[in-house]
Image: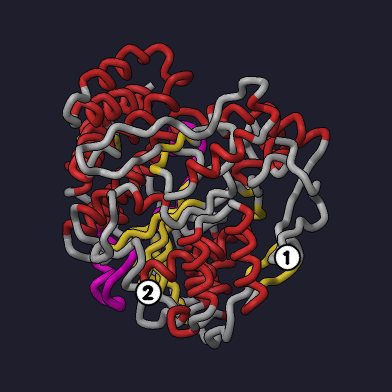
Amino acid sequence: AVCQRAALAAARRAAAAAPAGEELAGAIRKARKTWRQEYPEMLTRLVEAQSYSAQRAIAIAEAGLAEIYSTFEFVRGGEVVGVEAAMAAPSAARALHTATVAGSGALPTSLSVPYFGDSLSDQVLVDQVNAWADYGALEPAGAAALCAVANSAEWRDLRGRTFVALGATAELGPLALLLQCGATVVAVARGKPAKWAELVSMARASAGTLVVPLKRPASSDEEIAAAAGADLLTETPELAAWLAETLPALPKGATVGTYTYLDGELNVRISLACDLVCSSLVAKGLCAGVAFVQTPSQAFLLPAGCTEACDESYASSYLRLLRYEPNARPAAPVADGEPTRHAHDGYVPMQGPNYALAKAINHWRAVLARSRDGLTVSSNVAPACRTASMVAGDNKNARAVAAALAGMGNFRPMLVFNAETVAVLMGMLLIHDVRNPASVASPSTPLGHPLELLSAQAFHGGSFRVGVKPAALGRLFAITGFLFPSDPRPTSAGQLQRGSSAESVA
């Protein structure tokens, strides 16, 4: 309930921050009892309001985060305080210790990307990246970024660079690749000794260095694994304090990445906790950049060419005759002299409004960090993929999600990937963003609009360019996934390999 109130309040305040935003704020207020059904349209309209101008985009992001910060509270031992007050008063009794795990491995001579049982590297990797882009699953700027990293041993040498991974054990997180490339990685995750033992072993075999928060001092690898970890939800102030003490002794210019996910309303809380940690480090001048791996199931400002691709695909689809909703939306209102802009509604109702709010927090922080605070911001969209959180474990929708993922490939240019593939590709985009001074992540690179940061390099898996709105295809994804599972794999020759049909259903 608190998350729904926060979502409504944040969306209303954000909408009201825009000139002539009272109408949208009023519509959001009226949607209080039907928020779960109406949030995709309301939040997409909020992105359209942001697209009006750069100033409005920043104002809306500031208002949304301000409302989130004022709505949530930090509760410990029966004491309730505001989240910012809590961050200013970490508990000395809960202070964390530090362990450093240095690797002894060599830097790799090339990158290897696992892909359905194969391993892609060098020119084979470059050709496959371009095939994904030609198919419509990856934006051209993203393809160029991936190819640049694949071809640059200099960029892949991350010795002397520091990264903080909040949610270090996330399936789509970059920790393994960063260590492989020689980076110093400060890993934040909950205390799970078996998982930490894996990370410590990985670090020892890598060219990088792993820095770990500890509950108590430890020296041997076994002791480190047993004592490692901290909870972002319950130890937020202490983690921020520990990072503030730890980062000055590490290679300068840390990039703080958020890679967390929890089910339901806990996802909002964990996103806020990460944002509190990030903002505290930014305020202290202890990080040079922030990073996120984003989902395509949000609202975005579409890159050039996407709306035309959607229209072309829709015009040739038989689903148009059945009055399925088109993916392309009308142009959003913009200020005088501004170019035409289109928003994309990628929301998946099954994921729910808590998921949407958690990701909105990330989007708002990314916009402010780059366009207001002058930080390097790596925020890249990852395609739909088979992660454990989606198709296994405690996910009550796991069977339906697995079927939908199996059916997406029937609707060109939709593609679904395995998590091991996406983790490396997203890590490569992060490397590009911090190493290329001309990347969209750099605050010195001119952008036509702040929201372009979030979508310019998107590896959206086809959702930005498919003809029918993704949410409208949800049932067809699942039905065809049960009946005609499809796993298309476009090649550089313009063909589709096994596991797919040559022609799409729609």
Question: Where residue 398 sits: x, y (%)?
Answer: 67, 36
The relative height of residue 57 versus residue 161 in the rendered view (above or below) is above
**Residue shown at 61% from the left, 33% from the top:** 315
Q: Which residues are magenta?
A: 241-267
Q: Quadrant of the N terminus?
A: top left
Instruction: Identify residue type, mark 2.
Output: Arg
**Residue shown at 55% from the left, 63% from the top:** 425
Say if the magenta span includes residue 471.
no
Other-residue count near label 2 (Cα within 10 Å), few / some / many at <14 / 14–19 / ≥20: some
Secondary element under disc 2, as helix, strand or loop, is helix
Residue named by callout 2: 435
Q: Are marks 1 and 2 in contact (CB under 8 Å)?
A: no
Question: Where residue 12 sits: x, y (%)?
Answer: 26, 24
Residue named by callout 1: 493
Instruction: Identify residue type, mark 1.
Output: Ala
User: Nearer the observer, disc 1 or disc 2?
Assistant: 1
